Image (cartoon, rainbow, N blue to C red):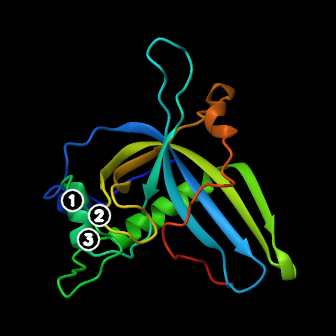
Amino acid sequence: MKNTINIIFLLLISFSGFTQNLTEKEFVILTFEMDRNKDSHGTFIYYWIAELEKYEKVDEYKEPKIYSLFLHEFYGSEQLESCCLGKVSYPYTMTTATEFKFPENYTEYLTELRELVKNNRQKIQVIKKEWKDGYKEKVTVYATAVRGKLCECEFGGNTYLTKGDRISFPKGNYEIIKNYLTKEKRILLFKDFSDFEFANTDYRTGK
């Protein structure tokens, strides 16, 4: 089976009404999976984007640009629309004006995209922490190299993230890039995520 996710045609039509002029690019989807032995149930899962770019005159990569990617449907459709128009988005804010008029088959689209990411990921780091009274935490970081489009915009709230941060929502077809994470991209492969603030949703799996 080809490693690509094909969006249902109706979804593409629905998206076309509110979108930036997006170009396809290559990037890495980072998955952070956190497990704790106490005071929590299930595995916390967080998604981020890492973009790699070389210096103009040196054959080396810059420090990767990393920002949030939302692959779970916890926000109002008006926040997705705002981001796809390049406007400030408040995905964690719910008001009486919040709507859930997502493009048709949007939930299925996100589910299939999460599966694509999970089935083609590469483990790049494991972080273990221990505290007093036997509290332990394990964070596993995975990387999935893809080619596709993103709606990107400025974050306007103050929950989880900082106002002014970049956030993103997936849009359209995604294709896995094979053999992308080579040694020359070690700036990402060997990046220390132990102090990285990766919590950007409250999603967790059940146990």
User: Residue lying farthest left?
Assistant: 17
Crowdedness near tag 2: few (<14), some (14–19) or many (≥20) residues, C-alpha within 10 Å: many
Q: Nearer the viewer, residue 5 or 144?
A: 144
Residue highlighted by disc 2: 156
Q: Is residue 24 above or below residue 194?
A: above
User: How far, Cα to Cα, is label 1 from label 2?
Assistant: 22 Å
Query: What type is the residue that disc 3 sits on?
Result: Glu
Is 100 left or right of 159, judged from the image as shown?
A: left
Amino acid at circle 2: Gly
Q: Does dot 2 land on a helix, a strand or a loop?
A: loop
At x 66%, y 51%, the residue is 193
Query: What residue is disc 1 on?
Result: 15
Cβ–Cβ under 8 Å for marks 3 and 1: no
Residue 124: % across, % down: 70, 47
> Residue 141: x and y, percent?
66, 55
According to the picture, the residue beneath numbered tag 3 turns out to be: 104
